[in-house]
Amino acid sequence: MSKNIHNYILTNFKLNAVTVIISTAALIFFACSSLRHALFQSGAFDLGIFDQAIYLISIGEVPISSFTGFHILGDHAAWILYPLALLYKISANVHWLFAVQALSLALGALPTWHLARVAGLSESTATTVAVIYLLYPLVFNLNLFDFHPEVIALPCLLGAILAAQLNKIGWFCVAIALILSCKAVLALTVAAMGIWLFFFEKKRACGIIALFTGVAWFLIATQIIIPFFGGEVAAISRHFPRYSYLGNSFPEMAKNILLHPWLVSRKIFSFATLEYLLLLTAPLILLLSPRAALIGAIPTLVLNILSENSTQRNLVQQYSLPILPFLLVTAIANLSQSSHFLFLVSKKINLNYFIFFWSLIAFLILGKYGYFASNYLKSLDNWQATREAIAQITTKGGVLTTHEIAPHLSTRSLIKFTIANSPINLAEFKYILLNLRHPGWLSTQEFAADLVKQLKNTSLFELAYQRDDVYLFIRK
């Protein structure tokens, strides 16, 4: 057997191994998110919003979310939802979103493997790096947190970097378009990536394309699309409150940052920021050092650090997702340098085993797989009753229910979830489904009990189902 044939077989074996790893990861991700949903642990925010919007698009209706009160494009200008609606034409089922999310997150391992090979790493080390990507806690945790279109951007960001490295400008443009379709703020990441590619990687064409398309789309999305489809409500209720201490508009925020820099510095130099940086880097800390590639992570890092919302500084939700590709590129670059301290370690132990076990330990500590044995089992005491009540909602009439039940019924034009002490117009709903034991996010048991009493005493509704503190009322 010639050397070329041997290398060809070996390379294909490694690729097949990566394919098996990716397929297995996608199946695990899909099973976990589906199980979480079945246990009534998903929510209207953010699964129900996207499920309802995509369903409305699929049947030709205007995708105005009854959860937010405005057009879905007024949220994050995520036009990727329109092609996703083709899946709902086959069957309007929320599990499509779980499948898309699971596959997107798992597929990020493929460009990661190729980036490692382009950097000169051996096939075994490249495979290890791909596994390290899948073990990064954010990847698994984010898969459990409902659905977010930007998960599609994760493999695309890695693919765009790979295309730039290989001078595949056409594929680079396709990847950039997909990234920008997922969320308006990702345009800042694309622009920052363009600066890195242009000045440090000497990929002039790709750098210019990324920089100008990123800036242009950010301006178009934030100044035209979001205001047009969402109006002031979209900005006031969904975006600006996180940075209200800086102002209530982009110009005002920029002015305050320049004139009152201490507003920003006190956020940057804080224990919360230090804790956040440790969480981000701990799973890959052995492979990280300051490199130009980290420029691409700066916009997301700054937004998360400056936000008043602490959920932007964890490894559970989607906000840190655009940082991961640049951490991986940095790790790969360091692995490719024989001067890195890990090569001293590799003389005594297998380097691949060493970095794999470090990543595994980080995953075991920071991964939220334990929720399946704790938090996610809280609704089992009346799980069957909830399922039976949902089965009796047989039409597409308006529904009022809990935050956690909502995504099981969100393929309709009108659905809302209960919020304690919030006024309710009962007449707009055909069905009202309440769970007194588990009243849901933003609601309380007292509020739910009072609402049940009110519904029992009104002639507008009749009690259609009651079991284990689960109540279903249907309008007469």
Image (cartoon, rainbow, N blue to C red):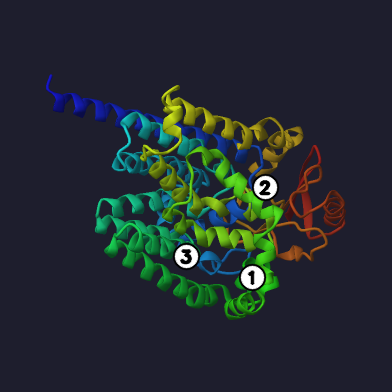
**Do the CB atoms of the residues marked 3 and 2 lie less than 8 Å apart?**
no
Residue at the spot x=45%, y=75% of the render?
220
User: Which residue lies at the image location 59% right of the left edge and 69% below the top edge?
Assistant: 70
Residue type of the residue flagged with mark 3: Leu
432 is higher (above) or lower (below) than 225: above
Residues at marks 2 and 1, CA–CA distance in whole angstroms: 28 Å
Mark 1 or 3: the one toward you: 3
Q: Amino acid at mark 1?
A: Phe
Residue matched to label 2: 405
The disc placed on residue 240 is 1
**Real-space Cα distance between discs 3 and 2?**
35 Å
Q: Circle 3 — which element? A: helix
Q: Which residue is mark 3?
A: 188
* Horizontal arrangement in the rendering, residue 231 relative to residue 20 (left or right): right
Evaluate whether residue 88 shows in this view.
no
Task: Say which quadrant the N terminus sits in.
Answer: top left
The crowd level at tag 1 (other Cα within 10 Å; few <14, some 14-19, many 20+) is: some
